Image (tube, rainbow, N blue to C red):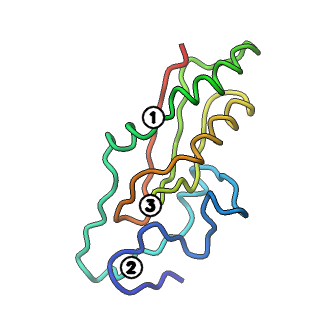
Amino acid sequence: MLVLAGCSGAGRSAGQLTVGSTQATLISYDEAMQKPVVIGDATKKCREKQLSGDQVVAELDRHLDEMYHQCVVSESRRGNVPSTVTIDIAILGDGSVQGATVSPGSKRLQGCIGDIVESIRFPKFAAPRMGARYQFHTS
């Protein structure tokens, strides 16, 4: 049931709550990428521009100190921090985060980083959704 006239269904999912609404919670990257999205009129030649890797990295880099100080430092006191953290993110065209998976690490570390990622607003883009992977070293 994906019906929308025109080219852009940017950022809207078919009947799905997005992260940030009062009823939604952060879902995994895989769950988010399996959700249907409105793509618009597929017979038109529309360019569905996504964010560049540099744009995604720049936005996540703005929150890296926050992730490190609130999550990594706190978890390192418990003695179990992975050397590299990977974040897979599903970003909707309106710039909101639809889902993310943080790995490896404890549930506490994953939840802490996930909460920060959930609050990030990326620039808007023309495609309905895109995926991105971001990694950072904890040492």
Q: Quadrant of the N terminus?
A: bottom right
Q: Residues within 10 Å of mark 3 (few under 14, many from 20)?
A: many
Instruction: Identify which residue, 58 or 1, lies in the foreground.
Output: 58
Query: Hey, what amino acid is under mark 3?
Result: Arg
Query: Where is 70 relative to 101, above or below?
Result: above
For mark 3, give the secondary structure: strand
26 to the left or right of 83: right
Q: Is residue 29 left or right of residue 92?
A: right
Specify the quadrant of the image occupied by residue 101. Answer: top right
Q: CA distance from mark 2 to mark 3?
A: 13 Å
Q: Amino acid at mark 2?
A: Gly
Q: Which residue does the numbered mark 3 point to in the structure image? A: 129
Image point 43% across, 84% down: which residue? 4
Residue 40, numbered circle: 2
**Residue at x 69% of width, y 15% of height:** 76
Is there a contact, CB below 8 Å, between mark 1 and mark 2? no
- Residue 66 vs residue 41, the one in the foreground: 66
Nearer to us of marks 1 and 2 is 1
The answer to the question of whether label 3 and label 1 lie on touching residues, with beta carbons closer than 8 A, is no
Name the residue carrying label 1.
62
Q: Nearer the viewer, mark 3 or mark 1?
A: 1
Q: Which structural element holds mark 2?
A: loop
Q: Position of residue 44 (x, y in %)?
A: 26, 81
Q: Nearer the viewer, residue 31 or 7?
A: 7
Separation of residues labelled 3 and 1 (CA atoms): 21 Å
Residue visible at 36% across and 60% down in the picture: 125
